[in-house]
Amino acid sequence: MSEYQYFEFLAIDRPLSAREMDHLRAISTRARITPVSFVNEYNWGSLKADPVDFMRRFFDAHVYLANWGEAIFMVRLPLEAIDEKTLEPFCTTSHLTVEKLPNHWLLTWSLLGETEEYDPFDFVEETGWMARLAPVREELLRGDLRSLAIGWLRAVTTGEAGADAWEPAEVNGLQEWTGAQMALAEFLEVDKDLLAGAGMESRPGQSVEADETVFDTWLDQLSQPEARQYLRQLLAGQGVRAEREVKRRFAAWQATRGPVEQGRHRTVADLRQLAERAREQRMLEEAGARREAEAVRKKLRDFRLAQLALDFPKAWKSVQAEAGKGHASAYDAACRQLVDLRDAYDEQALSASFQAEFRQFLNEHRRRKALVTRLVKAGLCQAA
């Protein structure tokens, strides 16, 4: 198989300048470049630049995929969005790393040559990874840390984190993941039962939706300069930034309310037990879903057979019409209709009548070898 690489970069906080776009064009004449994006694919060669440098200088999100099993997702966050003490416990494996830039954090989730689970071409083209993953950045900016936990859970999935290792930190709300977080878990191939198990004994997340009394309690604690800062941001057209900061601070304040609970961190062994419980629960649910689907399928088929029994001559005319078309898809249709007809006759205790009609049909079409082959395969007759 030839080499295949996919690079996509996204500028979120500000568009690229004309000069920056010219700089990128000089690096790649084939790339699709817009004021907010850079996309290129390589079946030979590679990007003639360091993707990390692109992130340091121009972009806020990056997706990279290679057909030898490498997958990388990066986001760039302002330093004030999250503190180093919060980040460090999660960035202890190869699956989630952090680099401190002069004004930003650069977070990298990685899957490095460890997977054979996907066709890289379908993996890129059919799933739209950037669109699915980019919201992770906005969630982090609003104080949602669950995507950090997903990076560590990848290390649990691979066995890189030993049975005695502890969760890096308690992250609330793991029983309900966002769409972007589920996409990140899929991207990193985190075990889905492990993901579900991690939420089984997790405390609910702090909702940004609260009653007015709670809002007022927090707002009363804001100093006048702090309140003015947020208002100035709104007036300056920086409403998104103001909303991020307010919600992040409010969520952090909510998390500090009430008594601090101790001993809630879990070991990898604990999580594996929870994952087994989640697997058992999933299997029961899937079995139930299969039973329900089979009941619906049977009900529909019974209705179909009853409708056929209302007018058998009409049904035989339809079979004859399909068989007479003389091509593969029509033969397939005729074969399906004959199976239904056989079962409809059986339901009416008229099997002998079906066999008589079928022998006549077979005599008329015996020279259609492709049709006869299909009838034999369906168990309607025996090979000559």
Image: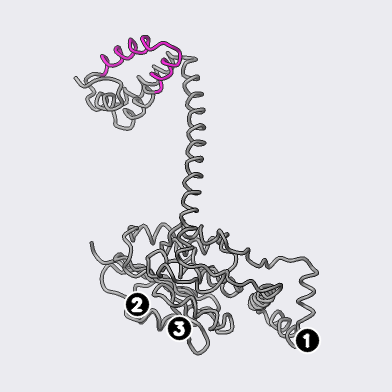
Residue depicted at x 19% and y 19%: 384
Q: What is the three-letter code of the residue carrying label 3?
A: Glu
Q: Main secondary structure of the magenta part?
A: helix
Give the mark nearest the N terminus, 1 or 2.
2
Residue beneath the point at 30% across and 69% down: 42
Q: Which residue is mark 2?
A: 28
Which kind of residue does numbered mark 2 sit on?
Answer: Ser
Q: Is residue 222 left or right of residue 90?
A: right
* In the depicted structure, whether residue 129 falls above or below residue 335: below
Mark sitting on residue 105 = none
- Circle nearer the N terminus (1, 3): 3
Q: Which residues are magenta?
A: 340-365
**Residue 340 versus residue 59: which sits nearer the camera?**
340
Question: Label 1: few (<14), some or many (≥20) within 10 Å?
Answer: few
Please check the rendered image and state whether residue 352 is part of the magenta-colored stretch, yes or no.
yes
Name the residue beneath numbered marker 1: 224
The residue lying toward the viewer, choosing from 1 and 205, is 205
